[in-house]
Image (tube, helix red, strand yellow):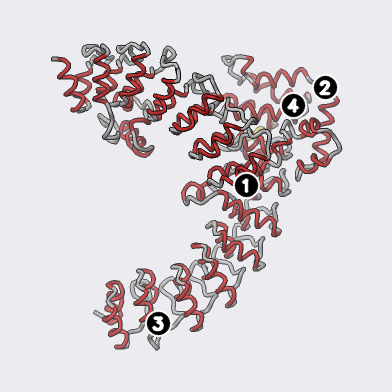
Amino acid sequence: MSELSKLHQAIVAEDIQDITHIIKGGADVNAVFNQETAFTKALTVGCPAAADMVMTSSKFDPNAGNQFNTSPLLVSVREDRVHYVNRLLTMGARVNDANIRGSTPLMACAWTDNAEIAQLLIDHGADLNQADMMGRTALHHACSHVAVKVASLLVRSKCDLNHQSNNRETPLMCALPSTYNSQVARKQVSDMLMISEMLIRAGSNLNAQEDRGKTALHRTVECHDIHGLCLLAESGCEINIKDKSGQTAFHLALSQHPPQFDIARFLLYYGADPNEKVPHLNTTPIVPPLSLLLKLRRSYNELGNSWSYDRLLQCLQRCVYPTLALLQAVSDADRNIPSSIPLEQDVARNVLQWLQANQPCSLQFQSMLKIRQALGSSHIFKKISRLPITLVLKEYLSLGLQQDWLPLTTFCQLHLHIRDFKNDLAKEIIQDRRNINLFIDGRTPLAVAIEVGNTEIAMLLLSNSGFCPNIVNSAADNALHVAAQYGRDELVEEIIKRYRDIDKVNFKKCTSLKVAIEAGNFTLAAILIQKGANVRSPRGSISLLHMAAACGCPQVVQLILSRGVRPNVKDNFKNTPLHLAASKGGLYVQRQIVVPGLYRDPIAESLDAIQMILNVSRPKFIKPDTGHSEVVKCLISHGASLTKVNEDHQTPVQVAELYKAQDVLDVLTKSAV
């Protein structure tokens, strides 16, 4: 075994005595072994004592890199070792040495957001604008890693804000909220927006285009980011720039999968051209946006987002002139509107009737369109606010947006403050607004507060006179539905005080009680029943008793039975509630009927769903502590039959045997004797 091999083994073993002996014996501490030098190995395995010994060697070179040209300085920065950074700089480490990917120590500061080390490197001459192999500078890295402190330091140090990478991407494009950073890296959207706003204020080019011709605004649409969109629009970006495929941000929103109706609507508010023709999903023929939107009505049921669709259609109606050419373009779309939708509920048909009945339009409407066109597509709300006209006319020019909702970025901030539990900041915005029911990302501030469990803000919003609890998200849920979904027991009493229709249904025809039972929030379900919620289900749907039995909740089953529901009622598969309890919900899981209350988390539910697709006979990941045995006892005590058979000709006992539910089987067998 060579001396170099022994040295690296001793470093891994953290044997300081052997390390000292081998180094004094003349081992080359700068040589690469298994990809690393002695120093980079010591820091990588977390043995600073070994690194100290290596640095005492007279042969130690502070610039000797490993197999990837990663210098001791870069490794020290990456590992957040300020002490070693200072020592290496004192020993003459080159501050701008890059590894084979072109990453420099200054870029590495962004990976851990260490502004202290970044300042040290800058003080020792680090190049602020040096680019890596992809053409990305330290500022690109800071923005991509949501390194707020390092990004702030680089901006203050006058780095190049508009440097474009090899694909012509600017730091601002990297800084804007992305799905990866928010959902995978778990970074706060508010931090991403803080960096973005910092760059904008410092002079970043809002309209720069990357190699596909897309601007930062296009990026926000691709990332489904309404917060970044509002920030860019209110900072004065140009709304109608086209990319190389000829799409504006508005066109891009309509061609996403699924279409981003809310984002498209906000772009219209900010001045997107509603008349600019666009290929339907990047194909021919070219059609007006209104015609494209009406064609999407064909997928009305599949989209599952009719609320957002209808709001966009109504907004588009407010800003297009019904010319004969437009009427001709949308005539084919009329045939795509499902006639099964009641006329009074169908926004698409109402819009078409309006187009046909208002040609030519009123002078007032034409004037509004001309004024908006004259104001342009940047800073449009600021320009409207300065006009010497009444508040009513300003709202008319703003396409119906209440002036109390402007600027829209304020409401974006409110949503983020609620999510981040920055309640003092949230309260300032709430107390300064009369109407706080603006939807951002398909939900009101109250819906956000209930979802994340911010009880303090939820109670404040419920007590606010400007709050409307009827619909709080684009699924037509009211506040009670959302509380039921997320198990917010502490809010139920207050919501019921404000919203007395406890049995209101959402778009899925679910009451809040059904939502609570399906989600496994049984305490809240019991509260709703005690408050008078209807325990009977519409004909053709799965009964609440079946679902409660499937979930294994004896308390809810008892309450439903005590309200007169028959214990032997059958579902569409001729299962009684006793069949469901005997299978521990497996009969529904096997048919891919969603029963979240059976599981501790969505991952376990997904694993069972996959198993069912693979024809596994029974669920394996349901909670071990379900109350199905108690449910069986409760049902039998209320007269449930042990001899009823389902469509597979199975009795509850046979079902329990099939699903190997031994505890339930014991209860059934004992009751049958």
Q: Is residue 7 above or below residue 163?
A: below
Whole-number angstrom distance, CA of label 3 to CA of label 1: 47 Å
Residue at 61% in and 69% down: 128
Q: Nearer the viewer, mark 3 or mark 4?
A: 3
SS at badge 2:
loop
Q: Are marks 2 and 1 in contact (CB under 8 Å)?
A: no
Which of the two labelled residues, at mark 3 and mark 4, occupies the earlier sequence position?
3
Please identify the residue farthest to the left as the structure is shown: 673
Give the CA separation, mark 2 to mark 4.
12 Å
Name the element at disc 3: helix
- The answer for how far apart the CA atoms under marks 2 and 1 are is 38 Å
* Cα–Cα gap, marks 1 and 4: 32 Å
Give the left or right position of residue 625, taking residue 416 as reference: left
Quadrant for the N terminus, please.
bottom left
Whole-percent x, y for residue 131 in the image: 58, 67
Q: Which mark is residue 360?
A: 2
- Local crowd size for mark 1, using a 10 Å CA cut-off: few (<14), some (14–19), many (≥20): many
Horizontally, residue 185 falls left or right of residue 279, namely left
- Mark seen at residue 326: 4
Tell me the amino acid under the disc marked 3: Met
Q: Quadrant of the C terminus?
A: top left
Q: Amino acid at mark 1?
A: Gly
Q: Earlier in the sequence, mark 1 or mark 4?
A: 1
Q: Identify the residue position indicated by label 3 in the image.
A: 55
Q: Give the CA distance from mark 3 to mark 2.
A: 84 Å
**Mark 2, other Cα within 10 Å: few <14 / some 14–19 / many ≥20:** some
Position of residue 557 measured from the top left corner of the image (x, y, whole percent): 33, 20
Q: Nearer the viewer, mark 2 or mark 1?
A: 1
Say which mark, if any, is on residue 630: none
The residue singled out by tag 1 in the image is 228
